[in-house]
Amino acid sequence: MKAFKYLLVVLSVLGITPAWASSSGSAITLDMTDATLGILALVLFAFAYAFVIAEEFIHLRKSKPVMLAAGIIWVLVAIIAKGVDGGEGIVDAAISHNLMEYSELFLFLLTAMIYINAMTERNVFEALRSYLVGKGYSYKVLFWITGILAFFISPIADNLTTALLMGAVVLAVGSDNLKFVSIAFINIVVAANAGGAFSPFGDITTLMVWQAEKAEFFDFFALFIPSVVNYIIPAVIMSFAVPNETPKVVGDSVSMERGGITICLLFLCTIVTAVSFKQFLHLPPFMGMMTGLSYLFLFSYYIKITTRSDNEVAEFNIFNKVAKAEWDTLLFFFGVIFCVGGLGTIGYLGAVSQVMYEGWGATNANIVAGVLSAVVDNIPVMFAILSMNPDMGVYQWLLVTLTAGVGGSLLSVGSAAGVALMGQSQGKYTFFSHMKWTWAIALGYAASIYAHYLING
């Protein structure tokens, strides 16, 4: 039985099952890792997450299995708590803590998603795609342009939106060239993930680290050069395999709708507001984001009262942008946070943290966490580490931010960008075509860690 328990602990690292920690950093758990119901909860989460990993093949939205697992796990936690002195108080405190974590993340991301949807509706991204397509660049030039743009757009938008935008450009000019589409998509995935690693807004994992106050806003920009290294090494290697041809491009010009540029500027103002709330007023970033959302609401009212076309008013209904938010993603975060919070409350934190951070050392543990994020989504990986709350300095927190962010590039299923592009490519970019270049991406991964050590160590 003891050997089985340690096997499950290892599985919990692979599936990521942290314990809840108090604001002071000390773990408050039921300490019932030997309980049969605790082990059942652990197995249940691993089973649910298997469905998440298989989403591409079974077409079951990832939010559904983890939300069901979260509910059942907390039922098991509540039953276990009845046999522990003070158990109900521990459960109440843990739920409150996890709810606060989720609500802050939810409100922040919801605002960002509404802005992105508003920009999409105003043809901001389509206008950029149309411009690039109409220039008649060669495959090699397009390879570098789409990669570099993905690297620099991702820190502001999310890596998923960035990857889909650049993927549309690649398909528009090279859909008849299988080799170019495949390698350009790999380049976009690596660039989008690397670009998101050096900005608090670039990836969910960086946002979580920033909101947890493990690093200040400007600390993340110390990862800029390591992120560049992570992108540029595989890009240079792959560029030699890009066809040296110029495609024939036929496409209609797309112009931006009224208010598109203004919405982009309002989004930047919203980001500045969120940063200012955090840096100068010590208010949580989501307060700044929600304040910034009011900018968009007021601008939508301005468009409504100044437009002459009833159709345009109907199209730019701001609450339609709310409805089009990535609700599957937002609900997936709920399931993950409450699954790992429930498992953590049972008490698996001590064993996992001892094995990884006390046994292997922080550097090795953080490097392994990045590799794990290629198989398991980097969000539960990072939430697990934040819940473990290992005693690390800013250097190590930036290291795990980097590795969790870019580690997903090692496999096509390791990040939202990769999964989305596999669907968009219609078979031209696959798991195995990406894996063909994993060795080059791994070189960039190792080099970026070394660059972080040289610059920030």
Image (spheres, rainbow, N blue to C red):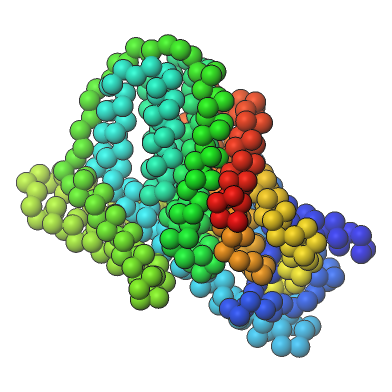
Residue drawn at point x = 78 percent, y = 58 percent = 360
Q: Is residue 84 above or below residue 117?
A: below
Residue toward you, 3 or 330: 3
What is the residue that sits farthest to the front in this orientation? Answer: 454
Residue toward you, 443 or 265: 443
Residue 73 in view = no
Name the side, left or right, on which 263 lies relative to 371. Answer: left
Q: Quadrant of the N terminus?
A: bottom right
Q: Quadrant of the C terminus?
A: bottom right
Q: Is residue 262 above or below residue 333?
A: above
Residue 89 in view = yes
Residue drawn at point x = 42 percent, y = 48 percent = 155
What is the residue that sits farthest to the bottom in this orientation? Answer: 85
Name the side, left or right, on which 309 lies relative to 250. Answer: left
Residue 12 x, y percent position in the rendering: 75, 58
Residue toward you, 139 or 415: 139
Residue 139 x, y percent position in the rendering: 42, 18
Residue drawn at point x = 44 percent, y = 32 percent = 147
Quadrant hosting residue 108: bottom left
Residue toward you, 149 or 5: 149
Quadrant hosting residue 385: bottom right
Residue drawn at point x = 69 percent, y = 65 percent = 18
Residue 205 x, y percent position in the rendering: 53, 56
